[in-house]
Image (cartoon, helix red, strand yellow):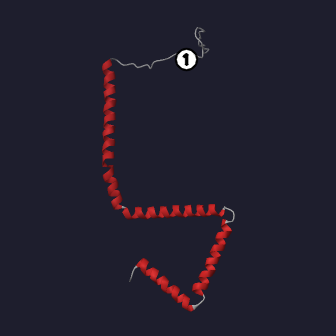
Amino acid sequence: MEPELKQAEYSNNSPTNVAEPTTPAITLDDAGSLATVSSEQNEQWRQVGEKAYTILAGLPEYLGAFFSEYRRPLITLGLVFGSIVSVKMTLALLSAINDVPLLQPTFELIGLGYSAWFVYRFLLKASNRQELGQEFNKVKEQVVGDK
C-alpha cells in the first residue's frame, strides 16, 4: 500500500497577495442562546465590578488602620530613607563643586584657615578651653533641656 499524496489545487482567478475579508464563524442554534451568553457575561462583569467596588470602598479604612497601627515604624523608615537621599544629594553636590576649577583648593584653604583659628582661639590656653566647655554645655542644655 502506497500512501496517497494529494496536492492542493490553486486557482489563478484572484491575486495571491490580497487577503479576503472573513467573518468570524459563530455557530449558535438560535438568537436566544446568543442573548443568554451575553447576559451571563454581563452578570460576571457586574459581580467583578461589585467585588472591586467593595474592596476600593474599604481601602481608606484599611489604610487608616494600617497607618495608625504602624505609625512609628513608618516614620522611622521615612526618616532613614530621607537621610539616605539627603546624604546622596550632598555627596553629588560636593562632587559637582569639586569638578569646578579653583573651587576645591579655595574651599580647602578656607577650611584649613578656620581650623587654625579654632585651635588658636579655643584649644591652646586652659582658660579658653573652659570657655569652650561652658559654651558647649549651654548649647547642650538648650537642645536636650535642663536635667
| Residue positioned 31% across, 23% down in the render | 35
How far across and how far down the image is residue 129, in percent?
Answer: 55, 88
Q: Secondary structure at mark 1?
A: loop
Q: Quadrant of the C terminus?
A: bottom left
Identify whether 103 is placed above or below 143: above
Q: Is residue 23 above or below residue 52?
A: above
What's the residue type where badge 1 is placed? Ala
- Front one among 77 and 87: 87
Crowding at dot 1, Cα within 10 Å, few <14 / some 14-19 / many 20+, comes out as few
- In the image, 104 versus 9, the foreground residue is 104
Q: Quadrant of the N terminus?
A: top right
The percent coordinates of residue 146 (x first, y second) are: 39, 82
In this view, the residue in front, 68 or 3, is: 68
In this rendering, would 116 be left or right of 21? right
Q: In the image, 41: left or right of 107? A: left
From the viewer's perspective, is 22 left or right of 49? right
Where does residue 49 sit, x and y in percent of width and height? 33, 38
The one nearer the camera, 78 or 1, is: 78
Name the residue rendered at 31%, 37% in the picture: 47
- For the point 52% across and 63% down, which residue is it? 86
User: Which residue lies under the disc numbered 1?
Assistant: 19
Q: Residue at x 31, y 25 (%)?
A: 36
